[in-house]
């Protein structure tokens, strides 16, 4: 029976006749696409419109939106959930954290990185990668490097960082590591701790990846952070499932 529903749902999904906005609609579309993907006779038209990898990307994007909406709803309406989230922020707080550059890359249009994204892994380490480089038409950019970095980490351990000031040098322009603070509200402030020579590349090497031991030797904080993240993930999944099944206790526009 649901194959027939999928058939009539296909035009709306493909042509964007209905753009889902609420959690329920987003989950319904993701479930519809998952079922379409499982049917061999649907695979060819779906791949034609979405591309071989486009369908997986669309499903992944919908699931991410569902996750964010459910997370935001719980932060605003579930005191126990908010308490767990705040505890995770406090567990990550550190007065002396080091972000070490673990790999560099040579970019054609950039000489140094300006934005970074990352997350805290199950092992308690934060892994960041360069998401954006500097403006390519700056004639003195090859002598510059990110000196101060600021940003934030959320209760899940997702990091968003940005270089807020640049250092200048003729040889020592490649960052080795940064030292800074993670505040209990998730704010991060980092300052350059050490640089090394970038002479042979002519100032073209830039940060590719960084790593930080967020919890240091505090294994109990690391374990508690992981446990809290599992609890929050379970609550998000339960809410998503309840809304998808039409649970009346939640607002219709959620």
Image (tube, rainbow, N blue to C red):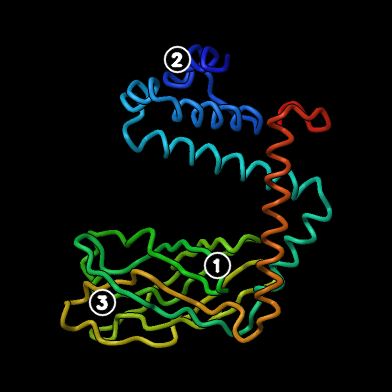
Q: In which quarter of the image is residue 2?
A: top right
The Cα atoms of the two marked residues, 3 and 1, are separated by: 31 Å
Q: Is residue 83 above or below residue 223?
A: above
The residue positioned 34% from the left and 69% from the top of the image is 208
Residue 68 picture location, percent across and down: 62, 45
The residue positioned 33% from the left and 28% from the top of the image is 47
Q: Are marks 1 and 2 in contact (CB under 8 Å)?
A: no
Image quarter in which the N terminus is found? top right
Q: Mark 1 points at which residue?
A: 120
Q: In this view, does 190 lie above or below 72?
A: below
Left or right relative to 132: residue 154: right
Q: In which quarter of the image is residue 38?
A: top left
Which is more toward the observer, 3 or 223? 3
The Cα atoms of the two marked residues, 3 and 2, are separated by: 54 Å
Q: Mark 2 points at which residue?
A: 11
Whether residue 17 appears in this view of the structure is: no
Left or right relative to 74: residue 27: left
Residue 157 picture location, percent across and down: 59, 64
Q: Name the residue under label 3.
A: 143
Which is more toward the observer, 198 or 148? 198
The residue positioned 49% from the left and 40% from the top of the image is 61
The Cα atoms of the two marked residues, 1 and 2, are separated by: 40 Å
């Amino acid at each position: 029976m649901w194959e027939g529903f999928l058939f009539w749902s296909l035009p709306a999904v493909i042509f964007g006749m209905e753009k889902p906005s609420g959690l329920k609609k987003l989950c319904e579309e993701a479930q519809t696409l998952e079922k379409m993907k499982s049917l061999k006779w649907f695979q060819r038209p779906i791949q034609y419109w979405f591309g071989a990898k486009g369908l997986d990307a669309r499903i992944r994007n919908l699931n991410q939106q569902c996750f964010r909406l459910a997370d935001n709803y719980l932060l605003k309406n579930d005191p126990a959930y908010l308490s767990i989230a705040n505890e995770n922020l406090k567990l990550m707080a550190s007065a002396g954290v080091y972000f070490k550059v673990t790999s560099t890359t040579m970019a054609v249009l950039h000489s140094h990185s300006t934005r970074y994204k990352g997350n805290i892994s199950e092992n308690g380490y934060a892994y960041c990668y360069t998401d954006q480089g500097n403006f390519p038409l700056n004639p003195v950019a090859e002598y510059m490097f990110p000196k101060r970095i600021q940003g934030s980490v959320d209760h899940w351990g997702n990091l968003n960082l940005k270089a807020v000031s640049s250092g200048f040098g003729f040889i020592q322009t490649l960052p080795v590591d940064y030292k800074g603070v993670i505040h209990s509200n998730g704010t991060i402030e980092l300052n350059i701790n050490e640089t090394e020579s970038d002479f042979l590349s002519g100032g073209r090497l830039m940060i590719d990846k960084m790593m930080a031991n967020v919890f240091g030797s505090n294994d109990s904080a690391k374990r508690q952070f992981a446990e809290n993240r599992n609890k929050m993930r379970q609550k998000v999944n339960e809410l998503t499932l309840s809304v998808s099944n039409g649970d009346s206790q939640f607002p219709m526009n959620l």
